[in-house]
Amino acid sequence: MSSKKLLIEKLWEAVGSVLPIAGIVAAVCFFVVPVTTDLMLSFFIGTSLLILGMALFTFGSEKSMTLIGTYIGSRMTKSRKLWLILGVSFLLGVAITIAEPDLQVLAANVPHFDGTVLLVTVAVGVGLFLMICMLRILFGVQLRWLLLGFYALVFLLAALSDRDFLSVAFDSGGVTTGPMTVPFIMAMGVGVAAIRSDEKAEEDSFGLVALCSVGPVLAVMALGFVYNGGGSAAYAGEQITNYLNTVELTGGYLSALPEYMKEMALALAPIAVFFLAFQVLSLKLHKLPFVRILIGLCYTYAGLVLFLTGVNVGFSPLGTVLGRELVSGGMDVLLVPMGVLMGWFIIRAEPAVHTLNHQVEDVSAGAVSGKAMGISLSIAIAAANGLAMVRVLTGLSILYFLVPGYLIALALSFFVPPMFTAIAFDAGGVASGPMTATFMLPLAMGACQALGGNVLTDAFGLVALVALMPLITVQAVGVVYMVRSRRAETSDVAEFFGDDEIIELWEVA
């Protein structure tokens, strides 16, 4: 596919991801909850920048990050040096996570936390667990047992952790597996799996996203034992600016651009430096592919700057105001159905979900259709957003939902093929896409603030619920696949020994 066609495709994918949410929000603001005209106009501008930024970012990421991951993964496998594979995996895991846009949005929205401290902690968690992923692929360790062990450790630490750290920790695991990290991790996994020649090598390349989601949770919980908090009590979505005229509105966006240009330059610099060093010392790519990757990095940078500017200046603030006004106007009863409705459309518009659906259809040889998978994921995310709004209204602990949820998910892993378990846990990372962190979380935070609740304990945790529910629904689809497979086998046996196969001896005579 040509670069022009790919860019247009990414633009339409971004439109499909953002417009359903923007349409629902516009309808609510025009007919149910009044907001100021300048805020609504700022939201529309932010939506446009968000769409353009997502398109440029995903296009650039595919042209640069995925290729860098593939080249480096392939080069590491050829070296067959374990220390090199683990060292490079850790460094790249840290570098790529810091540049993850969903994590940038989350870090900007956590009150009483220093954003840089949170970013570095989460990045180190991903780096360490990417090393574990590489060891798992190389030695063929079953994903199920690793998940059981690490989640047991997660909930042991959760019982001892400060309540203010719990929801943020679980949300950190959801946002790290975003559009920057996932393609890179998957490309590295496939490259390292090439070392093995057995039939399960390809199967073991799945599940990397699942394990890399655990690392940040453990890292942030561990941080809670030594870190007393810092940073501002405010968060990005709370900083609502009123504009008197269109010139002031334009100035608000233009003044924010330099800040995000600097932030993203610092975030992408480690990746660029690492790639250049690897190119000089080992890769030695020809001029054309090398230049294409550099151009892809430029697209990625431009996309990230526009994405974060649109999110923080115009998109997230309206989510905060909408949640606040729903509660203040006595319409908090609408929070749950609105969460369910938005959840249904968020996941159906997520481009990576369509890839996942086709993947499951291929793995099951058509026994589970892509449509059935799509419906199961829509139900999962709709339920997750609805439960998140219930938490905002009631103040229930996130553990009341996560403990039974993960117990069910891990129990199901013993009844479905290992491939479905890996895909299910990977799907949790795919489902918690950009719209969850950029709009649904600020909506919950605004409502929680108006109710007088604790934002850290009651609003955060939404991303964690979104990441949890697909673990159950995708494996439930795996159970359906198992039942259908057994029925098909029974049907084949019955057909082989059926009445129509009986030969009457008198006819032969």
Image: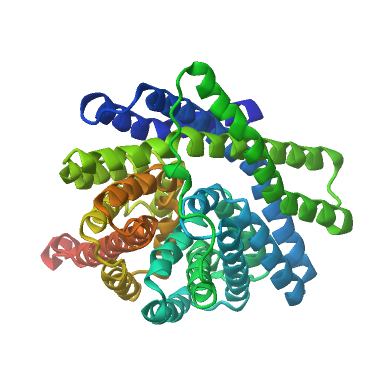
The quarter of the picture where residue 135 lies is: bottom right
Residue at 55% across, 64% down: 205
The image quadrant that residue 326 belongs to is: top left
Nearest the viewer among 60 and 126 is: 126
Tell me the residue at 25%/30% (across/down): 28
- In the picture provided, is 146 more to the left or to the right than 457? right
Tally of numbered discs:
0
Q: Nearer the viewer, residue 506 or 108?
A: 108
Q: Nearer the viewer, residue 302 or 393?
A: 393
Horizontal side, residue 9 vs residue 37: left or right: right
Identify the residue at image location x=66%, y=48%: 65
Report the residue that reaches farthest toward the left. Answer: 506
* Residue 369 appearing in the image: no
Q: Residue at x 56, y 77 (%)?
A: 140
Colour mode?
rainbow
> Where does residue 381 sit, x and y in percent of width and height?
31, 51
Q: Is residue 318 left or right of residue 71?
A: left
Above or below, 241 against 282 in this view is above
Q: Viewer-proximal residue, 164 or 211?
A: 164
Quadrant where the N terminus sits is top right
* Residue 396 seen in this snapshot: yes
Residue 440 rendering spot, x and y as whole percentages:
36, 45
Residue 373 image point, x, y percent: 32, 50
Q: Please say if 160 is above or below 44.
A: below
The residue sitting at the top extreme is 246
Q: Quadrant of the C terminus?
A: bottom left
Q: Position of residue 411 (x, y in %)?
A: 31, 75
